[in-house]
Image: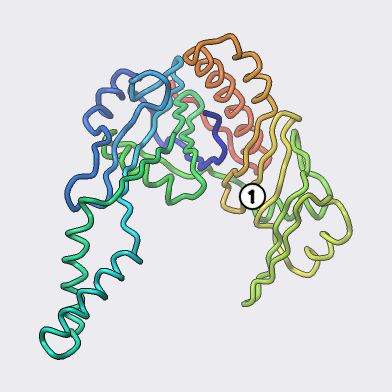
Amino acid sequence: MWFKNLQTYRLAGEWTLAPGALEERLAKHPLQPCMGLNPQSRGWVAPATSPQLVYAQGRQMLIALGVEQKLLPSAVVKQTVDERAEELASRQGFKPGRKQLRDLKDQVIAELMPRAFAKRRSTRAWLDPVSGWVVVDAASPARAEELLEVLRDAVEGLSLELPELAQSPGAAMTAWLAGGNAPGTFDLDQECELRGNDQTKPTVRYLRHTLDGEEVRKHISEGKLATRLGLRWNNRASFVLTDKFEVKKLRFEDIEKAREDAATQSPEEQFDAEFALMSGELVALLKDLEQALGGAPVQAAA
């Protein structure tokens, strides 16, 4: 259940919903199977081992959006359309035109879609009204927005904003690389991406490579800026920060210890322990990361 990618948002207003009230709202939109010609359905699913749609420890909450998609490969559609186009051409004595081909494609999709295989996936989000965070475990903003769009439908008046930072992550990461060190509780790891500003966007990537040498600083002096940077946090986690303030490849050092301790626990007890540990670590990590980028402290919701 440990989050691996963080898309982070700030609550713009006070969060007033208790877990039970949020459960009632999400329960109105559970995930339903794709029916008929619908290629996709979205709805809420249980994020933990229990059937509840909202998992809560105090005011810390975890939710999950489920998505079911019909798998209809374009190659299968094209092959079927081509076969029927040949049959139509032999009957009418000439090749079908564009409109006929479009109609054939629509007909094929309508016939095949109900028989297509369905694939499900889920995306989790951690809600922390105390510190004012909403964090989606997603590799891209588009995947996070998919969850947030459905959440806004369920929670009327929900307002989110991106964290306010005094420094752009790209400028800050470039300065850290130029100086050979990161601020506060952070240390440079062994991964980065540098990109030039001209039309060709020349890009240099380092992986499993020390970043405090002259070679990296030379690229920066030539005008390249950091777009990704591997960091270690307080000897407790490692991750890659992007110039969009995305956290990727997040790995906590306490994962293995938590799993060892969970050997004698039930699945419910294990989930409780891991969520308590993860949410506590995320609060501390995001606070340090926001401060490293000059973010102003945000008053916690009452």
* Looking at the image, residue 37 lies above or below residue 22: below
Q: Front-most of 250 and 8?
A: 250
- Residue ranking furthest to the top: 264
Tell me the residue that label 1 is attached to.
Answer: 167
Q: Is residue 190 left or right of residue 300?
A: right
Q: Is residue 30 left or right of residue 293?
A: left
Q: Front-most of 224 and 294?
A: 224
Q: Residues within 10 Å of mark 1 (few under 14, many from 20)?
A: some
Q: Amino acid at mark 1?
A: Gln
Count all numbered tags in the image, as a single digit: 1
Q: Is residue 1 left or right of residue 152?
A: right
Image coordinates for residue 43, horizontal then vertical, percent: 29, 37
- Residue ranking furthest to the left: 92
Image coordinates for residue 172, horizontal then vertical, percent: 70, 51
Colouring rule applied to residues: rainbow
- Residue ranking furthest to the right: 214
* Looking at the image, residue 217 lies above or below residue 208: below
Classify mark 1: helix, strand or loop.
loop
Image coordinates for residue 88, horizontal then vertical, percent: 15, 80
User: Residue 265's quadrant in the figure?
Assistant: top right
Which quadrant: the C terminus? top left
* Residue at x 52%, y 21% (from the top left corner): 275
* Looking at the image, residue 18 lies above or below residue 13: above
* Residue at x 71%, y 46% (from the top left corner): 230
Image coordinates for residue 261, horizontal then vertical, percent: 64, 13
* Residue at x 51%, y 40% (from the top left corner): 8
* Residue at x 89%, y 59% (from the top left corner): 214
User: Residue 218's quadrant in the figure?
Assistant: bottom right
